Each structure stands twice: as structure tokens, then as C-alpha cells.
Amino acid sequence: MPSLLGLFSIRWTYQPPNNYKEETNGGMCVTDDLTLLEAQQDIHELIAQQAPLETTLDAIAHWIGIQLPGAIVAFMRFDSARCTLSLSPSQRFSRAYYERLQDVPIGEGVASFGEAAYRRRQVITEDIQTDRRWEAFRSAARAEGLRACWSSPVLTSQGELLGTFGTYYREPTAPSEMSRRRLHQAAALIALAVIRDRDSRHHRTLAEWHRSLFVNHPDGVYEFDLEGRFQRGNAALEKITGYAEKELLGRHFNEFIDPNYRDLTQAAFDAARHGASRHYETVGTHADGHSYHIEITNFPVTVEDEIVGVYGICRDITARKRQESALRLLQRGIEASPNGVLMADASRSDMPLVYANEACSRLTGYDLDEVLGRNCRFLQGEKTDPAAIATIRQAIQTKTSAQVTLLNYRKDGTPFWNRLAISPVMDETGRCTHFIGIQEDITRERRQEAKIAYQATHDLLTGLPNRTALDDRLEQDYRWSQQNRRLLTVMHLDLDGFKTINDGLGYRVGNQLLATIVMRLRQLLGPFDTLARLTGDEFAFLMPDLTNRDEAAAAAERVLAAFEHSFEVDGQALHISTSIGITCSDDAVQHPLELLQNAGLAVELAKRQGRNTWQWYQGQGKQHTSEHVLLRHDLQTALRDNQFELYYQPIVDGVSGHIRSLEALVRWHHPTQGMVSPGVFIPIAEQTGQIIPLGRWVLQQACQHLANIRAKGERVFPVAVNISSLQFRRDGFLEEVQAILDETGLPPELLELEMTESILLGGAEQAIEMIDTLRGMSITVAIDDFGTGFSSLSYLRDLPIHKIKLDRAFIRDVLTSRSNAAIVQGIITMAHHMDLVVVAEGIEERAQQEDLVQRQCDLLQGYLFAKPMPWDALMKLPDRLPAIEA
């Protein structure tokens, strides 16, 4: 490395004191020996005291100046890497001369200094102008006014070249022997000073390195004496412990250790005090009182083979411990997971499994050692969906997540449905190193879904396709028969006398009979035929592969023949027949559902002709039927797509006009036909049974709507909801009403159910009992369209109802028909004697209102007051609607 001599330089010209005696002798000055000894002694003291190098060199220059008057002292540093000399900066030399003497290669004939360094001996140039060695530097020396140069190498005792020491003179001069010796002495003193300074700097550098490592180390670094007391510590230790260094000094380390870990910590310290190194973990107590985990390394401090103390390095590993604890918890969680967890090595092309939990083993039947190292494709089989496999491969290729459902196979060969979710695992550089997979056995779920799907399209009693599946199959068969020029025949079967058997022998026998009939009918099915159950005792045959009507008639005869023999049920022979309606696709139909409707019309004709026979569809009322068939199909879509909306019409006090209650009325927003009249779709819904889910929807929506408005603190009125007789007689109706009230939270006092007198047709006693139960639930019941039904007044006497509603047919002519007026008056008078409230519907004229008020009708409803409207519009109405002026 370059000599430290190069960091300092001196050019000094000596001016002797007046009391000195001078004698020129070959360039040497004779001086007082005592003064020289004192100067030399000062130099040695400076070196011994490790004074700054420039101070020591200044003293050496002064000492040379005393002995060599007129000398200009110069130092040149040696660069061992470049093997060059460079003049040290000095105010006594010009800038030009200084720059010329930079990076001068040492060697023979390179001025006095270059050759002195090269030969490792003193070189004297008495006259620069005549010395050939100065040829390259002569002009520079002439410009500087220099004529002589005496150069000596500065060497260590091992012969290491540190630089050169030289004296210049402005006149040609030769040294005496004494001068040469002085130059050697000066060079030796300079070498001693430089070496001592270099060693001192090296020691200071080492000390600074040690101090910097100690102070700036990111871990806590500290020293103990042999008793375990702190001697010093760094800033990191203060941060870890919470104590300032001055609070730690002189105190034993175990004062800052959790009591449960002091023995462990003491044992590690004792081992280090006796010469061993120890790396261990313990628990410290922070200055604020909380415990923290620390990792410690203790090792002895040895000086001249004697252990004088112990060093310690510590780091807070509380976060790491938490992470390790979290990882252990995560691992326990993964092991406890009921789902299989796999991890594959993404760095290898075959993606071998490197981890699998116990659930994976339970799921697949393979032991873990049979799983690890293999690609998870070993779980696949011939029925595994290729599309799902392609999805997984695409996710692996693009390093993305994916979820698929695969049919996999256990070790014993049994299949199971595996919902597999895979995700890439990235390292800190963003490189995908692994893929993690979560396996979930959804076989039971798949079976349940299949069961639900089956139940949605099949009749549970007979296993036949139901009406929903029949509609879909009808459309498929219709298209197929049209494309293949075949005849699609539809037969509608309605069992004759089944109700008598069902009521007389019970539902269980009735169900067994139906199942036995279906078993016999299945034997008549061709490869493309479909047998479906329409309702309780009605079935449909689809035969899409016939060529003419004769084949259809023959098929009907085979069906009738199947009923000629009795059916064995519970050890008894039951005889039953069927009526059949037939239609074919060669009729002018525009929609396949028309075929089913036409067959239904034909079966009615067969019934009227004595039953146990079959009849062709005659084509009467076809256009009307077509419209109804299409609307019936659209009704099913409307229920699914929520195309219905509730409107509300006020029911007001006849005299004051104040709103007393509301009637909820369903409206159908058809996507292509616009608003469909309830008078059109309600009868269709009743014919098809769709009135049941529609009525349930209206009841639930009205209750929920009113409950929501009530919860907001807005005004509410009792609401009346129409209930069809089919809905009323359905098993579980009362439970359904209670469940809706419980779900919505609507008080039952705010609900009124309106029913027509037709509810009595299915059994008056049962109807009376159910209405009485509703009344016990605080739900009021009103008879709608009163006066148009077929019940007797005796039933009306026994019904526990609250209100009757006069049909609009009587109100329309009340002003012009004496008969209607008499009926209206009679009903009002009779109802009041039975403590019933009377509502008149269809009030459209002020005169009608006035007439009914005179007849003491309680409540009125009609366009005179308000049309049915959405709730938002209803809320804008005043509490009091137009009433009779006094």
C-alpha cells in the first residue's frame, strides 16, 4: 500500500542563530553538539508520544537544517502498487515542479531520487546541470533554481521502501562524509516516525472498526466482567431491553431475565466464563415490564491467554417466536382440517407432491408415503372430465388460481367428487415455487344436488317425469318430429273413479294403486316415448316416432287394454279404467304446448262419452286455448323471474271517506304483452295449480311490505289478501300463514284473508274449523264476491268470519235495478244482524256512494276513491278520500 509518508511534506530552509559559529567544510555546517542532541532527543520524544507525523517530520527537518544550512528539504512518497515516487505538497516548490515530480517511476538513471529508491542507497548529484540522470527533469530543476540534490532512500528495518528523503541546493554542492551520515540518520529517523505513525493509525483503525461494529451492530452487543456485571452496551441493546446504558452498567444480567429462565442464562454465562461459547434462547424482562424472547451468543474475551470478561450478542426474536407459533398453529390447523391439503413443487416439471395432510390420506385411501413424490394425477380416471383437467393445467402454466370439480378415485377404486382449489405460492422475488391444493369431498353434496334436481323434474311417488320435465320433453320431441317428418302424438289419461278408491280405501292404498298402474303403463313405452304424471290421477304419453294416426289409435287401445285386468294392491283386486284424449302434431298447432292442451280438451270429451274410451281432439275453441297455453307457460316464467308486483286499493269509510284498510292486488308486467289483466291470468293459474305458488308469493310480499313500512314508523293500514280455494284447502296452509307472519314480524291483527264461497265446496265443516283457527290466530276472514256463490245461508251462519264483500255485479245496477237494490239491502240488513261488516266493491259514481250510505253499508271500495296503485303512489293519498258532502 502507499506509504503514509505521502500524507505529509516539509520544505524548510534553516537560518542559524547569532550565537552559532559556522565553518564551511564541503557543504557541512559545524554546530554545537548539545543543540543537535537536544533536537534529536525532541524527535525521539515526539515519536514515542505518537505525535502527529507532520510535527515529527517538522522536527526532523529542523534537525537537518541545523546541520545543513541552505538545504531545501524534500520528501517523496513511494507507491508500491505503481512502483512510483511522488513529491509531497510543499509551499517551497512551484506548482509546475510539483506536478512534474508526480508518479515518477523508480529506476536506474531516473534523477537522484528515482535511482536512490531503485538501488536502496544514497545518490548524490553535485550539479544537476551536468548529471545525465537528471536529463528528463533538468529543465524543471533549472526553472526552479535548483543545482544540487542529495537523495537517500527511506527504508524500514526489513528493507521496505517508504520513500526518499532529499536536500536541494541552489549552488553545485558535494556532501562531506559527515553530511552523508547525517542524511542517513535523517532517513532512519523518518522511517521510524513513519512506521510508528502507520502502526498507530493501523491500531486506531482497528479500534475504530471495533467501536463501529460495537456501536452500530443491529444486534445488542455488550460486555460483562467475570461476575456477570454489565461493563458497556450499544444502542441496539438499549432498544431491546428498554434500559439506557447507564441503567445497565454495574448490574448483574439476571436482573433483566425472567425468573423462570435465570438458571438457564446463568449456566450459559458460566460456560463462556470458563472458555466455551454458548448460543441459546432465553426470556428477558423489558423495562416496561413485558416479557420478550431473545437469542444470545456468549463467548469469552481472552487477553494474553487469560479470560478477562465475556462478550454477549443478543437479538429480540419475539416476532420470530410469534411467527413460529403462528406457523405451528397453522400446521396444526392444516392437519386438523377435514379437507385435504396438498403442496406440489412447481420448480420441477413433474410437479411432485411435497406435502399432504392426514385428511388427504383419509380422503383418498392412500398412505402419505404413497402420495408424496407423485403427481396428483394418479387420482384421476377414465371418467374424469378432461375440461376440468385442462383448467388445472392452464392455471399451472399461467401461475394463477383455479377451482374445479373432478371425479377422482380412491385407492380401492371407488369414485368420489373432489372440489379442488389450487393457488400459486410465491417467494420473496415473486417466483412461483409451489402450488397449494385444497381437496374437498363433495360426493354427498353432489348426490344431494342430483336428488334435488331429480325431485324438481320427477314425481316422487311414481318416479315419472313431472309437469316441468314434460314441458321440456314436449318441446324437444316436437322439434325432433318436425325435423324427421314424424308424427308426434300426445295422449292425456284421466283415471276413472280414482277419487272413490282414494277416499274410500285411504291415501296409502291410492298411492300404491297409482304406482302399480305406472308399472303396467311403463311396459307400453317405446324407445322414444315418454310417460309423465300431470296431477294426482292424470298422466300423459308422448310418442314422437309415429307415422300416422292409425298407429296413435292402436296405442290408445293398448292403454285401454292394460286396464282390463284388475290391479293387485294389499291383497285385494282393484278395478279401474281410464279416459284418453289424443292429439297429433299434424293438427295446425303453433306451439308444442298446444298439443297437451288439446289432449286435455279431448279427454273431457271422452269423459262425457261414458269414460273408459279414447277421443280425438276436435279443434273447437283452439285459438282461445292457444292463448291460454302460451300464457300458462309464461306464468311459470313470471313466477321464476319475479315479473309480478303488488298494487293496493284503499277501502274507505262510507260516510267520512277515511281509509280503513287496503286490499293487495297482484299485477303482471309481461315482458312482451305489457300489463296482463288479473281476469285473464288468475283463472289460468287456478286451472293449472299455479295459483298456489302465486298466492303464497302475494301473501309473503304483502306481509313483508307492510312489516317494512311499519318498522320505518310510517302509517300502516290492515291489508286484505285474496286466498284461492285451492290454496286454502291445501295441506299445511295454516302453518304456511303462521310461518310468513313469524318470518316478516307482521302483527296478525293487520292481516285479513279474503276468500270466495267456493271454499265450502271441499267440505263446509273443515272450512269452518280452519277459519275458526285463523280467528284464534287474530287473523280476520272476509267472504269475497258474496252473493254469487253456491253455499247456503246456514253455512254463512256458522262461518266465524268478520266481513262480507258485495260483488260488483250487484253494485253496478243498484241504482237502476229494483231486484239488485233489494238484494243489496237484504244482504246489508242480514249481515248487520249477524254483526258482520259489509264492504261494497266497484263504487265508481258519487250516486252509488250516496245510495249505499243511505242503506247503511259500512265500507266502500272502487275507482271513485282510488284505483289500485303501487305503494309509493298510495302514500301520497290523503287519509281522507272524497266523501259525501253534508
Image (cartoon, rainbow, N blue to C red):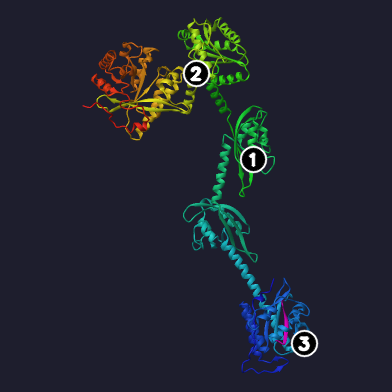
Amino acid type, mark 3: Thr
Residue 604 horizontal side relative to residue 117, left or right: left
Q: Earlier in the sequence, mark 3 or mark 1?
A: 3
Q: Residues within 10 Å of mark 1 (few under 14, many from 20)?
A: many
Amino acid type, mark 2: Ser
Disc 3 vs disc 1: Cβ atoms closer than 8 Å?
no
Residue sitting nearer the eye, 432 or 263: 432
Q: Position of residue 570 (x, y in %)?
A: 52, 8
Identify residue for label 1: 396
Q: How many marks?
A: 3
- The quadrant of the rendering that contains the C terminus is top left
Disc 2 vs disc 3: Cβ atoms closer than 8 Å?
no
Question: Helix, strand, or loop for circle 3?
Answer: loop
Please indicate, yes or no, whether residue 224 appears anywhere in the rendered image: no
Amino acid type, mark 1: Ile
Q: Position of residue 467 (x, y in %)?
A: 52, 19
Identify residue for label 2: 626
- Stretch in magenta: 146-156
Label ID, residue 130: 3
Looking at the rendered image, the disc whose residue lies closer to the viewer, 1 or 2, is 2
Q: Which residue is at a point 74% across and 73% down the rendered structure image?
A: 83
- The quadrant of the rendering that contains the N terminus is bottom right
